[in-house]
Amino acid sequence: MRMQSESKPTMSQHELATLGLEFIAYMKPVVVEGQPLVAIHSANGEMVGLVPTREAASLAIRENELEPVSVH
């Protein structure tokens, strides 16, 4: 009996970059001109907003029907 080799699914760089795009957004603490803020990024890494607090970021993300994920 001959065993078939299993091929693993592959994902293109574009597919990887857009993975979760419709479901999650990232929150990342940043400092802009000496002011601590929280940047909101889409799943593909594009910054889509700056807000003053983590709570404001989470609220904005959820208002857009996405799941917030924290990046440290």
Image (spheres, rainbow, N blue to C red):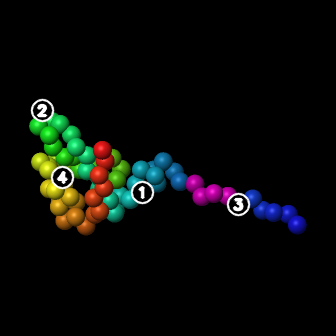
Label 2 packing within 10 angstroms: few (<14), some (14-19), many (20+): few
Mark 4 vs mark 2: which is more N-terminal? 2
Mark 1 vs mark 4: which is more N-terminal? 1
- Residues under labels 1 and 3: Cα distance? 24 Å
- Residues under labels 2 and 1: Cα distance? 32 Å
Q: Position of residue 62 (x, y in %)?
A: 22, 64
Label 3 packing within 10 angstroms: few (<14), some (14-19), many (20+): few
Please tell me whether mark 2 sits on a helix, a strand or a loop. loop
- Return the mark for residue 19: 1
- Return the mark for residue 6: 3
Mark 3 vs mark 4: which is more N-terminal? 3
Q: Amino acid at mark 3?
A: Glu
User: Which mark is nearer the camera, 4 or 2?
Assistant: 4
Mark 1 vs mark 3: which is more N-terminal? 3
- Residues under labels 1 and 4: Cα distance? 23 Å
Q: Position of residue 70 (x, y in %)?
A: 29, 52
